[in-house]
Image: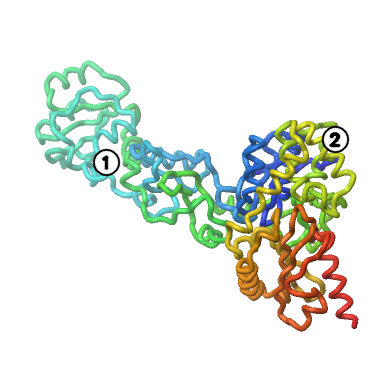
Amino acid sequence: MIPEPAKATRPVLVVGHVRPDADSAVSAAVYAQLLNQLHGPGSHLGVVLGELTPQTSWLFQLAGLPAPAYLPDLRLRVADIMCRETQAISETGSLGEALRALVEHKASVVPVVDSSNQLLGLVSDRLPSCNYFHNFNTEDFLGVLLELADLERALGLARWQAPTRPARGRIQLDPGALHPGDLLLTGDTPGAMAIARRHRAAAVIACVPRLTREWKLALKQYPYIGLFQFRGSLMALASQLAMAIPARNVMTQEFPRLSAEQPLEEVRQLVAETPYGLPVVSPDGKLEGVLSRASLLNSPRQRLILVDHFERHQAGEGIGRADILEIVDHHRVGTIETPVPIRVDCRPVGSTATIITSKFSEHGLQPDRRQAVLLLGALLADTLLLTSPTTTDTDRTHARQLAKRARLNLQEFGRDLLARNDQTASLPAAELLEMDLKEFSTGKLRFAVAQVETVDRARLPKAKLAEFSRAMAARRLQGGWEFLALMITDSFRGDSLVLVEEAHPRRRQSLLGANPSVWPGCVSRKKQFVPAILERLKTDSES
């Protein structure tokens, strides 16, 4: 049975090697779909770590299915752990609204955004500016930091009479200190209206439960003085004045901004040193989420299922900080190690797609037509239309069944598929070299083998072979390998033209023969070429 994944908000990634061929990309995509069928939608996600080959892109287009999601590496990113449900407030929101959000949601920061979700600033009780405004003398800032309309909106004032002059002075509790344009706060004292009129104050806020006869009379006598009701005590009113300050007037605009695609390693220290959560913004400045220290400290590890590779250097960057749950492969057991036992499904067949096809039947399921197109294409691509020595009876049986289910002619589809992988004439040698290059090691010796497929190697001019040699020499030095071999595999002839760049040219003749040389019947790097090289290296070291 396939193990149940641990419950988590993020899916388990099903991923192939860093240079995804058809088998790697298809296996990741279809196995993730099978696991989602078994364990629930969204529990697994197929991804690739590199650009798809034209052959693979064509295969997904033919199947009518989207290609796997692209990831540059396996490192966790800000987007993986940030909080997307942020308690943002609008630019017209108040300081009190922001502080309530901080308390109610146990947040460390409240973003301030406009109507299009553009990030304008941050409010936090951990910012000195916000703490200052919470405790400062609000009375001095009427008309500067807050308007009468802000008090009306934030404190829920009932407007009994609109003022005729702007409130641009101070907020006063002492009637004797009134000046023109001031705002007078009073209790249940209707006579305050006469005082306000005498000193040309703008308005009065009365702390009264209801509109009494005395207040109605004052309204008639002084129609030019604004009158507002606060349903609470005068002390409560005075203590809540600061809460009415618009958030835009107290927010900070000087803070680091994070990108959702940043690796956590790049932001870990910055987040750890910031006392409040940092906003995550899109390239056009819109708020996407918040990353806090708590989220960073509690961040889970990336969880992976590896397909079509067993070598650590073929995995993406970040593999060492991830939890590998399972490996599905048809290559040799390589250099990947895990701290705990995991499920390993390594079968001697021609492709990983063959194993994935088997898994469907082992669970009493069948791939649908589109999945069958993908699996058949991957199987035929990796076995060179069932001609590779890696091909088994299981591959042949599955290929016939998949072709029937996909409603495709196996031979015609296979020839079309292989022809689409022939880019030897159109692409630069350096680019071709990177498309399917794998590193190997034996003891302390490291080497690499690249493979390029063509439908007719005889058409390759000498100038192209010379271009390959120059690109290989530079790439060997860059990789620090003892030697780099290139297999130019003719899909229809069933052989490979082998080129070699060697650190010790004298050894090349004994190990690899002439350069270049044709290896008759050699089309498999995994089953023919690399084992032969490893055996020759072993013999050479013993002699």
Image quarter of residue 257: bottom left
Mark 2 surroundings: few (<14), some (14-19) or many (≥20) residues within 10 A: few
Image quarter of residue 230: top left
Front one among 451 and 223: 451
Mark 1 secondary-structure assignment? loop
Front one among 461 and 323: 461
Residue labelled with disc 1: 146
Mark 2 secondary-structure assignment? helix
Front one among 436 and 285: 436
Q: Position of residue 201 (x, y in %)?
A: 14, 35
Query: Residue at 78% of width from left, 66% of height from top?
Result: 518
Q: Position of residue 49 (x, y in %)?
A: 64, 53
Relative horizontal placement of residue 168, taking residue 536 as reference (left or right) = left
Query: Residue at 77% of width from left, 50% of height from top?
Result: 384
Residue labelled with disc 2: 361
Above or below 483: residue 430: above
Relative horizontal placement of residue 276, taking residue 252 as reference (left or right) = right
CB of mark 1 within 8 Å of CB of mark 2? no
Relative horizontal placement of residue 308, taking residue 396 as reference (left or right) = left
Above or below 504: residue 361: above
Image quarter of residue 57: top right
Q: Position of residue 436 (x, y in %)?
A: 69, 59
In which quadrant of the rendered image does the C terminus lie? bottom right
Q: Earlier in the sequence, mark 1 or mark 2?
A: 1
**Which numbered tag is attached to residue 359?**
none
Spatial CA distance of label 1 from label 2 is 70 Å
| Residue 313 in sight in this render | no
Residue type, label 2: Ser
In which quadrant of the rendered image does the N terminus lie? top right
Residue type, label 1: Leu
Relative horizontal placement of residue 316, taking residue 232 as reference (left or right) = right
